[in-house]
Image (cartoon, rainbow, N blue to C red):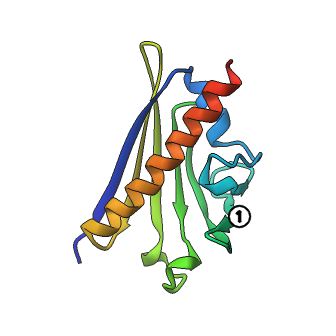
């Protein structure tokens, strides 16, 4: 089976630490993942849960923290029961966040692997694009 990767990037007019703080915050923001709450301690190997409501349905996605290099790189696994697929390792995605300091702010790159089709990868990319737009809104608002 071919594997397709969703890739998105965004410029945020803030330093990497400010962006990192929002991405890893347990505080829910309606602009980010429909206000999902993230539960984890961000330790290597720790469980991570995203809990919230999407299109009127409660969800609880989960995964593990694989890499943490604050404030540059974050890698986690991700599984959503809403896909209807079995909760087995081959149905998990790996999410890779890279935060790069650039002139005037931070460039955030986000990849999600293990998409079964190009269409699925594009659908995921749209969702992650929306999420990064929400991160930008929250970060830039917090800086005034």
Closer to the camera in the image, 85 or 64:
85
For the N terminus, which image quadrant?
Answer: bottom left
Tell me the crowding category of disc 1: few under 14, some 14 to 19, or many 20 or more residues within 10 angstroms, Cα based: some
Residue at (71% x, 46% y) in the render: 29
Residue at (52% x, 32% y) in the render: 72
- Residue 104 position (above or below residue 61): above
Location of residue 71 in the rendering, given as x and y in whole percent from the top left corner:
58, 30
> Is 126 positioned to the left or the right of 139 in the image?
left
- Residue 68 position (above or below residue 66): above
Q: Secondary structure at mark 1?
A: strand
Closer to the camera in the image, 54 or 63:
54
Residue at (46% x, 51% y) in the render: 128
> Is 55 positioned to the left or the right of 91 in the image?
right
Residue at (34% x, 49% y) in the render: 7
Residue highlighted by disc 1: 52
For the C terminus, which image quadrant?
Answer: top right
Location of residue 14 in the rendering, given as x and y in whole percent from the top left corner:
56, 21
Closer to the camera in the image, 71 or 22:
22
Whether residue 77 is visible to the viewer of this picture, yes or no, is yes
Looking at the image, which residue sits at the far front?
Answer: 56
Closer to the camera in the image, 137 or 65:
137
Looking at the image, which residue sits at the far left?
Answer: 2
Whether residue 74 is visible to the viewer of this picture, yes or no, is no
Instruction: Give the quarter of the image for residue 126.
Output: bottom left
Q: How many marks?
A: 1
- Residue 114 position (above or below residue 86): above
Location of residue 101 in the rendering, given as x and y in whole percent from the top left corner:
46, 21
> Is 79 positioned to the left or the right of 124 in the image?
right
């Amino acid at each position: 089976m071919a594997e397709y990767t969703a890739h998105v990037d965004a410029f945020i007019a803030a330093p990497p630490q400010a962006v990192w703080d929002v991405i890893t915050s347990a505080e829910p923001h309606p602009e980010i993942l429909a206000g999902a709450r993230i539960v984890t301690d961000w330790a290597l190997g720790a469980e991570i849960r995203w809990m919230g409501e999407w299109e009127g349905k409660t969800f609880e996605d989960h995964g593990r923290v694989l890499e943490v290099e604050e404030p540059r790189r974050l890698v986690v696994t991700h599984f959503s029961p809403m896909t209807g697929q079995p909760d087995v390792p081959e149905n998990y995605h790996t999410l890779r966040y890279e935060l790069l300091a650039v002139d005037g702010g931070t460039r955030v790159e986000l990849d999600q692997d293990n998409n079964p089709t190009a269409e699925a990868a594009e659908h995921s990319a749209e969702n992650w694009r929306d999420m990064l737009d929400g991160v930008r809104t929250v970060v830039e608002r917090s800086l005034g």
